[in-house]
Amino acid sequence: MAPSAPHPRTSRFRESRAVLAVPFLLIAAVTVVDVLAPPEVHLGPFLVAAPALTASFAGPRMTGFVGAVAVLAQVGVAVVRTSLTDLNHTFQIIALVLISAFVTFFAHLREVHEGQLTRLRSVAVAAQQVVLRPLRDRMGPLRIASVYLSAEAEAQIGGDLYAAARTADGTRLIIGDVRGKGLEAVGEASVVLGAFRAAAHLEADLPGLVAYLEAAVAADPDRAPDGPGGPGRPEEGFTTAAVLEVPDAEPALRVVSCGHPPPLLLRGGRVLPLQVDRPAPPLGLSEFVDTGFTAQSFPFEPGDVVLLYTDGVIEARDASGAFYPLPERVADWPGEGPEALLRHLCADLLAHTPDGLLGDDAAMVAVERVGPLPRAGARPVDGPPR
């Protein structure tokens, strides 16, 4: 049996102790060299580096303690070399006390700031759990996996969205991308997701569900401020979306596309874009284009996988400016389930971009139909949430 790996907390504790030894070793080295140096050489000012270095990674208590040790070391040097009343050493000690006090105060400010960032991150994670609820890994005859990649290092949520809901006859899914960024995009995404969750199991057909989503977005009061366009003029905001329906007892899926990139169907090593014949405008723009919502059916048999994604995936660029070739990279997938597909794509997407940084948020949902079609009247059991 292979030896067990050390616990992560134990490793972090050992690392922190090793780093904390550096300022004390620095104090010891400067003190010894200063004592042994010729009378005209004074290395005491270098002791200030110890509390300054400690303030970069430790809290105010440890920083103050290191500063006190540095001051005691400077006092010891003064006693050994001359005396405490020596003017040169007196000013060195006073300067070291003042600088240690300053860096201790700044260590306190850094600790307060880090605490605020930690609380903000926890709030962002909680908000993400509310807006983007984790999808079930099994819904009826479907296996589902999802991933959200934020373009901002400290951000957890943005304008990309996805959701899934069970109905009496099957499963409905949505993936979308709100125009814009920041809290306004998050608010718009919450409107679309709230409307989808409220109506997914109530509307009889897919076009009716999309019409409900359009009405909810159009009725959002935040989209009609008194702005430069005049009172009551809507903002130039919209949401691209693809809304799908997968019946339990039929080897098919139905798609309504509202200006969203087409889903990709993976079947037998081939990648087929599900491009609808009559796409609708993005949600929020139907008042400018007089068109209805039409659902188009595509075969979706056991073993097939459909990949939903936002434009943050296909618009990711490499160092030369080339876009990420999603269909080609999907074709390289060995075929081990939706979770393996998303792991493969995430690693490949981040490797494609410079320094692993995305220019826009990216979301992906992979859905696989598994097993034979259910018998008439039978309803598959949904899996538990992940």
Image (cartoon, rainbow, N blue to C red):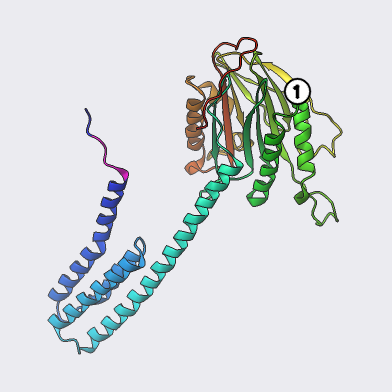
168 horizontally vs 82: left or right? right
341 horizontally vs 30: left or right? right
x, y percent for residue 281: 78, 34
Magenta region = 4-8
x, y percent for residue 220: 76, 46
x, y percent for residue 133: 58, 38
Q: Nearer the viewer, residue 344 or 110?
A: 110
Q: Nearer the viewer, residue 273 or 200?
A: 200
Residue 201 in the image: above or below residue 370? below
Question: Badge 1 is on which residue?
Answer: 295
The chief SS type of the magenta part is loop
153 horizontally vs 259: left or right? left
Q: Nearer the viewer, residue 258 or 247?
A: 247
Residue 101 in the image: above or below residue 345? below
Q: Is residue 6 magenta?
A: yes
Q: Quadrant of residue 96?
A: bottom left
Helix, strand or loop at label 1? It is loop
